[in-house]
Image (spheres, rainbow, N blue to C red):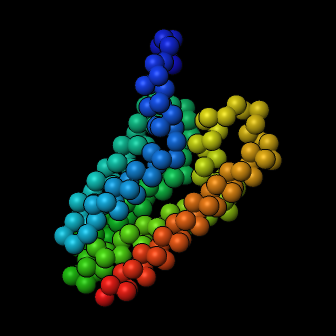
Amino acid sequence: MASGRQETAAEGRLSRLLDSPVIGMTPWIAMSVLVGPGRYELAVGVSLALAVAIVIVGRIRSPGASFKILEISDVVFFAAMAVIGIFPSAGTHRWLENYSGELSNIALMVIALGSMAVGVPFTLQYAREQVPREFWDNPRFLRTNYRITGTWGAAFGVAAIAGAYGDWASR
């Protein structure tokens, strides 16, 4: 800790949570919980606010740290969803309310697979904060992060397909 005092157990747990990919998923979780008929704007607004807050808190906690792919993608995606949702036609608005969950899962899949394609699986950025530097270039450590990120990407793809099928079947 910067102040030189010992971190309490509760502070340690909070710190680990704030340094995990779970925190980067918070805007997506909020979106999935809040979105529905008549609530698109609320869901996107809350999700965008959370995404921006996560980036700001990350800068405050670790001023010299690099931006995380997932957290920046959160801000970009939800800002785009907010802009798209400002003046949609009635049909587009209804589509956004019905399919934003699938769209979110597709975006998360693209983020996961895209981060792997550019050589920085999004979980690697979080894992490096938890693991000593001497392991960062270890092939096993890197391979593990590729597998974890790939598993996340596959899960998001399956969720998008399942959600689309569920929406289609219920119509």
Image coords of residue 156 (percent x, y)? 52, 66
Residue 8 left/right relative to 95? right
Image coords of residue 165 (percent x, y)? 43, 82
Q: Nearer the viewer, residue 135 or 63?
A: 135
Residue 42 left/right relative to 32? left
Image coords of residue 110 (percent x, y)? 55, 67
- Residue pictured at 25% horizontal, 84% vertical: 91
Image coords of residue 28 (percent x, y)? 40, 57
- Residue pictured at 45% horizontal, 19% vertical: 8
Image: 22 above or below 36 = above
Which of the 4 quarters of the picture holds residue 169? bottom left
Tell me if I can see residue 63 in this picture.
Answer: no
Which of the 4 quarters of the picture holds residue 81? bottom left
Image: 92 above or below 122 = below
Image: 132 above or below 169 = above
Residue 127 left/right relative to 58? right
User: Quarter of the image containing the C terminus?
Assistant: bottom left
Image: 70 above or below 129 = below
